[in-house]
Amino acid sequence: MTARWKLPARPRAVVTGAASGLGRALALRLAERRARLVLGDIDEEGLDRTAAAVREAGGQVRTLRCDVREAAQVEALARTADEEFGATDLLVNNAGVAVVGPVGEVSLEDWRWQVDINLWGVVHGCHAFVPGMKARRAGHILNVASSAGLVCAPMMAPYNVTKAGVIALSETLYGELRGEGIGVSVLCPTFLRTNIHASSRYSNAELRDLTGRLVSGATWTAEQVADHTLACMERGDLFIIPQRDGRALWWGRRVLGAEFQRWMGGLARSPRLLRWISERVGTGAG
């Protein structure tokens, strides 16, 4: 049976990747609950804009420049939360980037960049915050993964690998911490309207254009995903898959197995079909 978790009044939360997109949306939704927030990002100007919006929404905030690839910088978020607010009720490991391209064409440098941010960043967050939560026997961890970690599309190997790793880590933590009074959720959205594609890396211009169309044509906003996520988190869900297309793809993968992957490979080998889909298919309301 799923254990419900109620977000405390004036929750104390830490959010990485908070300068824009989903990180900002989650910070603002928490601010509406008068949250006390520590926000981290490498984009200091964007972080300042988020902080101003948080204060306007009723929250209290501290910001730190934080590159999640550096364990010491993530640990500084934990220390700041302890010093300013006494503890952390909610950790949101959100910082992430994308690398798109076929295996063999994506450089090893881009592989390392992807793994260091998307996977090591989450490992650093959990390593820094779990001991304090265990000592208090309270708290919740929200790791932002992707449906790409459940359904591995061609041309996205670095992204798929890191998001699958985040899901595996979250499942492991869910089992380890279930008796410690600590909740764990992993968010697995499909495309949503954020600017992640602007900071991503691509092996060619065609993949950049295709990804841009998929993101700009997404039907879900970051704010809608944030609302859905907080509701599911308080319900005690481990897996949070907001969009209908994500749930359908995950079902198809589990039922069809290798046949599903052959179908996905066929899509990747047909650029014309991919373009047609990107121009006509909204990504999964409901």
Image (cartoon, rainbow, N blue to C red):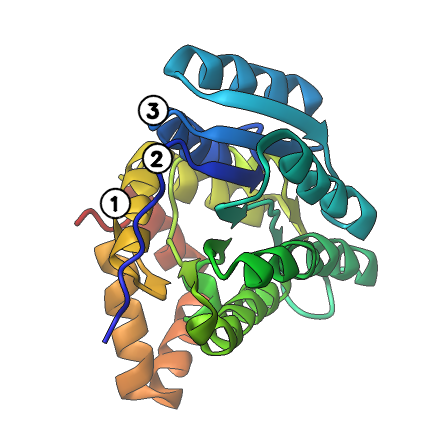
Between marks 3 and 1, how big is the CA–CA gap?
A: 29 Å
Q: Which residue is mark 2?
A: 9
Q: Which residue is mark 3?
A: 32
- Secondary structure beneath label 1: loop
Q: Is residue 42 left or right of residue 240?
A: right
Packing grade of label 3 (10 A; few <14, some 14-19, many >=20) is: some
Q: Earlier in the sequence, mark 3 or mark 1?
A: 3
Q: Amino acid at mark 2?
A: Ala
* Residue drawn where x is 48% and y is 46% of the image: 89
Q: Is residue 248 left or right of residue 199?
A: left
* Residue drawn where x is 53% and y is 70% of the image: 164
Residue 269 in sight here:
no
Q: Is residue 209 above or below residue 207?
A: above
Q: Amino acid at mark 3?
A: Glu
- Secondary structure beneath label 2: loop
Which of the two residues, 68 or 213, is positioned nearer the viewer here? 68
Quarter of the rendering containing residue 227? top left
Residue 32 in sight here:
yes
Q: Earlier in the sequence, mark 3 or mark 2?
A: 2
Between marks 3 and 2, how big is the CA–CA gap?
A: 11 Å
Tag in front: 2 or 1: 2
Image location (x, y in percent) of residue 195: 51, 33
Q: Which residue is mark 1?
A: 282
Which of the two residues, 270 or 193, is positioned nearer the viewer here? 193
* Residue drawn where x is 69% and y is 55% of the image: 128
